[in-house]
Amino acid sequence: MTKIEQKKSKKGTWIALCCIAALYVLLFLIDNVFPSTSFIVMLTPVLKKGAIYSLLCVSMNLLNGFTGLFSLGQAGFMLIGAYTYAIFTIPVAEHMSVYQYFDGGAIQFSIPEAIGSILGPTGGAFFGSIIAIILAGCVAAVFAALIGIPVLRLKSDYLAIATLGFVEIIRAVFQWNSLGVITNGSNQLRKYTAFSDMKLTIGGATLKFGTIFPFLIVMLCIIVIVLLINSSYGRAFKAIRDDEVAAEAMGISLFKHKMLSFVISCFFAGVGGALLAMFQTTIKAQSFTSAMTYEILLMVVIGGIGSVSGSCIAAFLYIACSEWWLRFLDSGKFLGLSVPFFRDGFRKVVFSVVIMIIVLFFSRGIMGDRELSFSGIAGGVKKLSGRLKKKDIEEKEDTGNE
């Protein structure tokens, strides 16, 4: 790397750090300073859900985009992560009301309460949730390792069908009444620690972290995935994606690296499931359908298969459009005027058309296999400003000549 390239890289890093710092300051102000206006009420859920789905998209892209394994089991591992998190964060005193049909359930233990006995209620909820989220990812990874042994020997569509079957099986198992003492059967799990409980008491003041918390967890997870992709393991994943025969000839163990990619991807899917449970405040196995996997896959395709930044951008755009920006299409009015065909469900029609246009004209997605570069953005802005300045000078010279 030349000195100029090193300088650009450092500049890009500083720009990225400044942008991240500005983002977290804004999120802190949203949680603790800004009044609860209608705009903030609409913005905060979109930010939280967008962050969660960006992690889910990146985890799926690790498997489908960087390793070339066509898996459709994301919703199943999200379900495992969500249930693991909820089961271990429900307060013991609430077990009888939650597990009312199963005599209070079998697991009489709460991680936030155990941590709270040392750090206090707010500290217990905050740090206990982090431990429960990690546990949720680990349980999902264990299931992935067990399932990966038989299914990772399959290829292409057969692997997709096998993992899709796993989603349906695990959803049915979690609704089985014989496991109701753990999963609550077909009933909801509720009253567990949610984003609204993410608070810390510092110097007598209670600070809220409901919006910052998912961004913090998601950012750390994506950093780990990016480091993995850029490591020797990541290069092995890409080699397997490009040509399995050539990768094996180079000494890469296909099964070992496929299993590693599968388990890591499912770990982060479990983490995403736990965060989704915190966002929704109640969970039910019935809602984790295969359609949820297709939705995540669609975001990955829109963003670009093989692009981490593309997955993040597509996730936020998809959630913002589907749950906020296009809502006026269901209201029956536009700019104060009554429009007959703007009725409930029309938003989904327009959104589907927009997605079709993106897929048709951007076949490789928004980013393709490229990544967002802050130094590249800075360079582009600098070039644009230079061109505008040059054009302005030329116009002034033409005016002077006249």
Image (cartoon, rainbow, N blue to C red):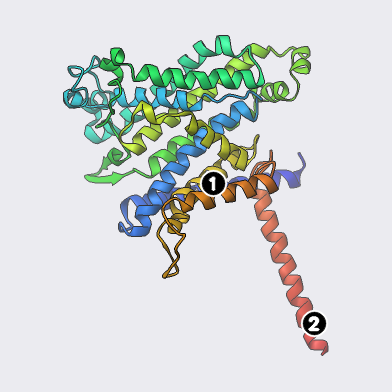
Q: Which residue lies most toward the right here? A: 401
- Where on the picture, by quarter, is residue 254? top right
- Measured as percent of width and height from the top left, residue 319 is found at 48, 46
Residue 88 showing in the rendered view: no
| For residue 281, side relative to residue 341 (left or right) | left
Q: Quadrant of the C terminus?
A: bottom right
**SS state under label 1:** helix
> Where's residue 78, x and y in %?
44, 27
Quarter holding the N terminus is top right
Name the amino acid, label 2: Glu
Figure check: 312 above or below 189: below
Local secondary structure at mark 2: helix
Lower position in the chain sequence, tag 1 or tag 2: 1
Count neighbours of disc 1 (C-alpha within 10 A) and say few if under 14, some if 14 to 19, many if 20 or more. few
Mark number for residue 17? Answer: 1
Outermost bottom residue:
402
**Residue contact at pointers 1 and 2, CB within 8 angstroms:** no
Q: Which residue is mark 2?
A: 397
